Image: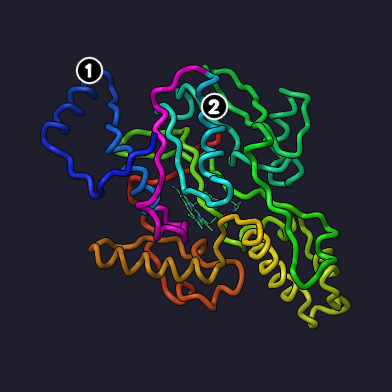
Amino acid sequence: MHRELNIPYTITAERLHSIESEIKATGTYHHTFEELDYGAKVAWRNSNRCIGRLFWDKLHVLDKRHLTAEEELLDAVVHHIDYATNSGKIRPTITIFPQGKAADAPFVIVNDQLVRYADDPIAGPLKQQVERLTADRSHILPLLYRYDGELKTFEIPADVIMEVPLVHPAYPAFSKLNLTWYAVPMISAMDLRIGGITYSCAPFNGWYMESEIASRNLLDTYRYDLLEQIADTFQLDRSTTVTYWRDKALVELNYAVYHSFKTAGVSIVDHYTASRQFEKFEQNELAEGRKVTGDWTWLIPPISPSLVHNFHKGYDNTYNNPNFYYRSKKSC
Ligand code: HEM
Ligand SMILES: N=C(Nc1cccc(CNC[C@@H]2CCCN2)c1)c1cccs1
């Protein structure tokens, strides 16, 4: 159940006292839903590498801290995918499972994203871990999770995973590559830290910025490395670098990804609009009297970076809490 709550949250002396006595008695404490909801939203607002932060107070927070049974926990993962996808009108959502650092939380997801193609080079190490545990070979990696200290796999039902066929309106030959990408990016291996509490299982999603798929996932040499094949479908002259065939292919591929998602009715943002939205975020934060922190190296888009405003300014990369952190590898 999702409840909209007013922001900002103000803590009372009584609440502080009750936290203190819970810590004295048990060594930790538990957030109220209001504290969890506000904490998760502020963690997004503090995510220095995120260009999508304008909508930080619209995050859908699904509180699943009460779940204990394995089937219920897995069902909540499937529900997240279904709820967030919302038939293409993507809802930025976070599902928060029982608290604890990765080593002692009852349920921890090992996958870095809930959906990952088995043939994606980035999936290498995870794929090896999965193949030691199961024989099934679907094109999407199963969920690898730790429950009660045991490493297990779960096949996410195909019907909740939406994919988008990639086409280019002006180049029919492009479809011959039979490229698709999954609709919703869902990060599942970062720790959410709020008020000294670590939630090591708190998968969250937004929607894609087109360049993530087009400039990085499909073109990085250590990812799908498709630049030449894609340039050929656009009939570009690859005989010399100075026909700018790489640059032309990159732009047309970004265009194709954006239009494919739009045609399929799946939320996506172009890099220019995303940068303008980030500029609005900066203005809003200033008006609220808050300093914006950011990581310039991730905030500039990988296509036409100097055409957007944030290329031309610096950012303070201080990490304020609440925030999201990489899980230390050893803990899983
Ligand atoms: C709503 C649409 C959103 C868009 C378009 C967006 C866009 C992006 C992009 C393009 C990146 C850089 C990713 C990369 O280069 O690999 C990023 C990073 C990040 N985003 Fe967002 N984001 C959105 C929503 C969210 C939400 C809902 C959260 C969490 C509640 C979030 C938290 C983060 C974090 C923690 C990072 C840094 C990840 C890392 O350090 O590896 N974003 N975002
Ligand atoms: N649009 C998104 N993209 C995104 C956000 C955070 C992290 C990532 C994955 N980043 C890792 C890759 C792989 C190396 C550099 N980038 C993607 C979102 C994912 C979840 C919420 S928004």
Near-viewer residue (204 or 71): 71
In the rendered view, tell whether residue 247 sits above or below residue 93.
Answer: below
Q: Quadrant of residue 116?
A: top right
The residue positioned 66% from the left and 36% from the top of the image is: 159
Residue at the farthest bottom position: 242
What colouring method underlies this structural image? Answer: rainbow
SS at mark 1 in the image: helix
Which label is found at residue 25?
1
Q: Nearer the viewer, mark 1 or mark 2?
A: 2
Residue 63 included in the magenta stretch of the image: yes
Q: Which residue is mark 2?
A: 75
Q: Amino acid at mark 2?
A: Asp
Q: Amino acid at mark 1?
A: Ala
Task: Determine the CA span between mark 1 and mark 2.
Answer: 33 Å
Give whichever of discs 1 and 2 has the lower sequence position: 1
In-image side of 84 versus 127 (left or right): left
The residue positioned 40% from the left and 40% from the top of the image is: 61
How many marks the image carries: the answer is 2
Span colored in magenta: 47-69
Residue at the farthest left position: 13
> Residue 125, percent across and down?
69, 37
For residue 100, say whether it is visible: no
> Residue 138, percent across and down?
76, 34
Callout 2 environment at 10 Å: few (<14), some (14 to 19), or many (20+)?
few
Which label is found at residue 63?
none
Which quarter of the rendered picture does the N terminus lie within? top left
Which quarter of the rendered picture does the C terminus lie within? top right
